[in-house]
Amino acid sequence: MIKTKPTGPIPSGYEAIDGELAIGGLTASALVAQHGSPLFVYSTRMLDSRMAQLRAAMPDGLDLHFAMKANPFQPVLHHMVGLADGIDIASGGELRMALEAGAEPAHISFAGPGKRDDELEEAIKAGVSINIESPSECDRALKIGVALGKTPRLAIRVNPNFDLKGSGMKMGGGAKPFGMDIELVAPTVKRILDAGADWRGFHIFAGSQALSADAIIETQSQTLALAADLAKEIGRAPEHVNLGGGFGIPYFPGDEQLDIIKVGNALSDQLRQLPDILSSTQFAIELGRYLVGEAGVYLTRIVDRKESQGHIFLVTDGGLHHQLAASGNFGTVVRRNYPAAIANRFEEEPAETVSIVGCLCTPLDRLSDNAAMPQASVGDIVAIFCAGAYGASASPANFLGQGPASEILVQ
């Protein structure tokens, strides 16, 4: 007998119309009929709701940045430019996309450990803030600024001596390609100031995808203390400190929503007790998946139903080439099931245990493994939730010549 594996929790905020999953007031069947399959659908209403909840929970005056690497789809990005206080980018390509979406250069920050000279030149010309990741990158940026006759806006990305406990991806603590070690920060800031460049402050990012409020609170406290220590060593207050993010969303069975009220209350207390050297500093947090992840659904049509040695496979026209993370091939050590449903049978009870697979010639192409689902047939539609972040743009769309999925933004 095949043992059923649980699926992750379906995000709140989705509804049913006539028993079908509906997004933005449209059923999954109607969306696929109009736009084809496979299809990523993003909800404006859910984006707005998440940002409103976050603003209500976080301290007044705290800037909320969108890390566009989570979802650079132009309609989503344009919408987020209007909601967020800043846009965080990680390449020259993202810089161009952010500017096309209407982001103000002064509200864009550029991080990433491998910035090319042409990207630095483009960023300095545009007037965005560059998060410097090494002393040599600093030297290159200053040299390019001189050649252009423009004053670079430079912050220091710090590799902290701590990480975010329980985070899915640790970005700080120990040897890392991201940012510069603490002992290099003050000398590099002095180099920036001596060169007459515009030193903007610090970017300190310790980890991502954490669901523990206590872990995030501890990390934010450590980050504020580190920023104060560095400012004292430099002898000058930073204008801006990006505290990083790390806010996670529930993907897997047993995951629970992050308590942002608890995080916000603690951060409010911490900001009220700042040392004098940080009293005039502007603080921000940088979030990607937390803002957009639950607002997206991947829809893919079942093209075959087959049985192999008692095991039922629902074969779809999509797969890991669009939703790499859901297949378990995007940094997951043990494969677990994302939230999933048969979209056009959304309110039906489970009737069988099935594996939902894609159309690729690889055993890695599994969207859901031994999951309890309503009985589904060819033509039915599978919904994979939490597809609004690190989905379409983080997956190998051209693998085996398949090509990208369609993407739409609905109400």
Image (tube, helix red, strand yellow):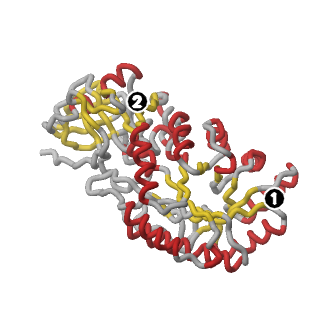
**Amino acid under disc 2:** Leu
* Residue occupied by mark 1: 142
For image coordinates 52% across by 36% down, the residue present is 73
Quadrant in which the C terminus appears: top left
Q: Is residue 328 above or below residue 60?
A: above
Secondary element under disc 2, as helix, strand or loop, is strand
Could you tell whether 127 is left or right of 25 in the image?
A: right
Mark 1–mark 2 contact, CB under 8 Å? no
**Residue 245 percent coordinates (x, y):** 50, 59
| Residue 381 seen | yes
Could you tell whether 62 is left or right of 137 in the image?
A: left
**Amino acid under disc 1:** Leu
> Residue furthest toward the front?
60
**Residue 355 percent coordinates (x, y):** 25, 39
**Residue 223 percent coordinates (x, y):** 54, 71
For image coordinates 58% across by 75% down, the residue present is 226
Pick whichever of labels 1 and 2 is earlier in the sequence: 2
Label 2 neighbour load within 10 Å: few <14, some 14-19, many 20+: many
Q: Is residue 54 above or below residue 101?
A: below
| Residue 168 seen | no
Quadrant in which the N terminus appears: top left
Location of residue 212 by image quarter: bottom left
Secondary element under disc 1, as helix, strand or loop, is helix
Nearer the observer, 120 or 53 = 53
Q: Is residue 237 above or below residue 294?
A: below
Could you tell whether 9 is left or right of 128 in the image?
A: left
Which mark, residue 289?
A: none
Could you tell whether 159 is left or right of 29 in the image?
A: right
Location of residue 197 by image quarter: bottom right
* Residue occupied by mark 2: 39
- Total tally of numbered discs in the picture: 2
